[in-house]
Image (cartoon, grey):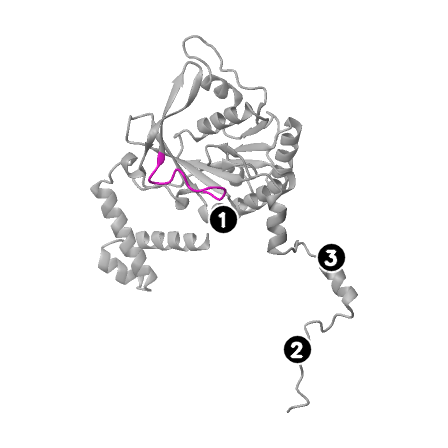
Amino acid sequence: MDNNRQTYDPFEGIASYREIEKIASRSPFVIKTANEWTAEAAALPNPVSLWKNMWFEGEVCCLFADSNVGKSILAVQICDEISRREPVAYFDFEMDFKPFQMRYTDDDTGEIYRFSPNFHRIQLGQDEVFSADIDDVIDNIEKAAVECGARVIVIDNISWICNRSESGDAAGILMQRLVQLKKRSRCSILVLAHTPKRNISAPLNQNSLAGSKKIANFLDSIFAIGVSKKNRPQGRYIKQIKVRSCEMLYGEDNIIEANLQKDGCLLHFVIVGYGTERENLDEPDAEDIERDNSQREIADLIEQGVSYRNIAEQTGKSKDAICRIAQKIKKLKAE
């Protein structure tokens, strides 16, 4: 037996257990047994659905869609429904107050829709300069929500905020801060976001969300609006993408079919039924299929390590086109 062999001491360099206790007291973690956590959670009420089991109390949720599909209209509709029960703070970074008023005014009679007094719409002041600092943005959102007495917050939309931030990772930082705000203020947050340029004949999924991996990982739930081929041009469908607080009810086999219409002074989504997502999507044309297959072939060759020159010779595509696909793959992996 080697008497000179040294044994590993995990507490080497720490003078005493009192110092260990001091270090533990500075830890940001809360340590309990699994049974203690479940007992504590069982004493709390179960989360309540805020809107159709797609967004629950205490969640950071995201609604996304292409431009001009109606996500702001649906967001206002959700706020209107919730505000009949409790205060709501709707941060509108997209639209000025005059277009907002016109959207909810009867074109024939001039009648204006009456929202609940619990529905607080918030926009930047005319002379205010938007802060590029994400922490300042979150602080001001929190202050305004507190002033409204609202624990339900809707932000329309995060793309506007992130595009004005000086940080290259603004989306990820913003989502981290929103999660912290949720925990700190025990509030529920719905953020609106765009989709990047996409094939509209393809199903909606997490990858359809702009900056998907930097955003989706922080979200408790996600739902999206797609354009339906049924009842053009107002046909829409609503699909559940991610859920934590219940079973997924409105996935690809049971999406909500709706029409976007104006009844008098109210512009809103009217649910007309349920169906599969495939039934509501346009069939891809030959050009779409050929382009997708070509890009998939190039992506596979890039992953195999084939040189750009050889890929160009095999596929007949330019090196510039191959470089763009390679950059897209690199960006997706970075997310």
Tell me the amino acid under the disc marked 3: Ser
The range drawn in magenta is 243-255
Front: mark 1 or 2: 2
> Pointer 1: what residue?
217
94 displayed left or right of 281: right
Query: In the rendered view, would you say 334 is above or below 163?
Result: below
Q: CA distance from mark 3 to mark 1?
A: 30 Å
> Which residue occupies the extreme left position in the image?
286
Residue 18 percent location from the top left of the image: 79, 65
Question: What residue sits 59% from the left and 49% below the top?
Answer: 38
Q: Is residue 248 on the magenta stretch?
A: yes
Instruction: Point out which mark residue 8 bears.
Output: 2
Q: Earlier in the sequence, mark 3 or mark 2?
A: 2
> Pointer 3: what residue?
25
277 displayed left or right of 167: left
Residue 22 percent location from the top left of the image: 76, 60
Crowd around label 2: few <14 · some 14–19 · many ≥20 (10 Å): few
Tell me the amino acid under the disc marked 2: Tyr
